[in-house]
Amino acid sequence: MVRLAFLIGPPRSGSTLLARMLGAHPAIHAPPEPHLLTPLAHLGYYARVERADYDPIIAEAAIRELVGALPHGEADYLEALRAYTDALYGRLLERSGRSLLLDKTPAYALVLDFASRLYPDARYLVLTRHPLAVWSSYVESFFDGDPEVAHRHNPLLERYVPAIARFVREARVPLHRVRYEDLVRGPGPELERICAFLGVPFEPSMIEYGAHGEGAAQSVRGLGDPVTVARESRPTTASLDRWADDLARAPQGLAVAERILGALHDEDLETWGTSRAAMEAELSAQPVPGAAARRRARSRYALERKLLVALRRNIHENAFGRLVKRVRRACDVLLR
């Protein structure tokens, strides 16, 4: 059995930072996001497969009939899926020479029921961050500061906050809560608690993750934070209040944020670690939007981001539109 831990949190919650810090531990292997479980969750037995390139109705009916005919039903099905993921996780871990594998894939937050059935004994680190900071970072990082395009493409908070909050409330697997704000303000005590939960000794050098060279950089390659974490060498509080500045510079930002808040439930916000009243007060305290836009550094990533946003704004259902969709899909893969 592979010693396995999952880092659960929405995109832009600081998961790449925490993965790099943990990957600096000599016992922990934190590879780039593998996205192993999300496709398995949508084979038809646990989640619907309408978007798959085969007949979803037939596939769903067939897999349910197949599972029903197995000697031990769902338990046999999970065992077979686990054999696949165990083999891949095990080979990754074997090659690394370490003893615990950390899978940091934000999309797992949307298939937590499946993940906890497949790996009920794994350790689950649940990372949360101020919801508006998550949203602002998502808009700035992937949508060139356009909140309307971002929300139309992916209502991020409305998807992730309820899913993670319910997972925390039910607590059917070993889990440990981490707040991004606490992690960057006091990384030492937070990492000590995380290491105790994972069953590995605390290593103070994890805080200076950038000093560990190739081994610590493993989790930043591939999918994940493309810019910020690679630029720093240790946790920083510089981004804690940036969401408010970004909101003040986006004419539509405040309205979109208020719309998002209206769609979230009080119980989920409280489980997350905030309240509707607190967030409403923060939003009402924001100045009227209209300040000059923050200048963004030029880079290959910034150019890809601008192209992606332009494509998302101008898609038409024709031959050119289909080409645009293919290019957009490639950009999505690059920027996620």
Image: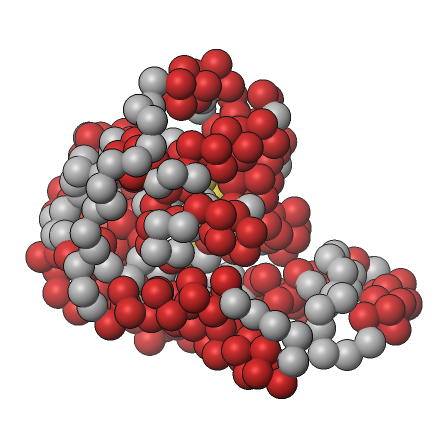
Frontmost residue, 269 versus 284: 284
Camera sees residue 270:
yes
Frontmost residue, 89 versus 181: 181
Frontmost residue, 99 versus 34: 34
Residue 115 at x, y = what percent? 60, 53
Residue 282 at x, y = what percent? 37, 20
Camera sees residue 133:
no
Q: Is residue 98 above or below residue 237?
A: below
Quarter of the image where one finds residue 168: top right
Please indicate whether residue 197 sits to the left or right of residue 41 in the image: left
Residue 210 at x, y = what percent? 13, 56
Residue in the image at 24% along x and 72% along y: 300
Please indicate whether residue 79 sits to the left or right of residue 70 in the image: left
Q: Residue furthest left?
A: 211
Residue in the image at 29% along x and 47% along y: 18
Residue 129 at x, y = what percent? 38, 35
Quarter of the image where one finds residue 323: bottom right
Residue in the image at 72% along x and 78% along y: 53
State how the image is colored. secondary structure
> Could you tell me which quadrant the C terminus lies in?
bottom left
Residue in the image at 40% along x and 23% along y: 283
Please indicate whether residue 156 sits to the left or right of residue 208 in the image: right
Number of callouts: 0
Please indicate whether residue 15 sits to the left or right of residue 280 in the image: left
Q: Is residue 135 above or below residue 39?
A: above
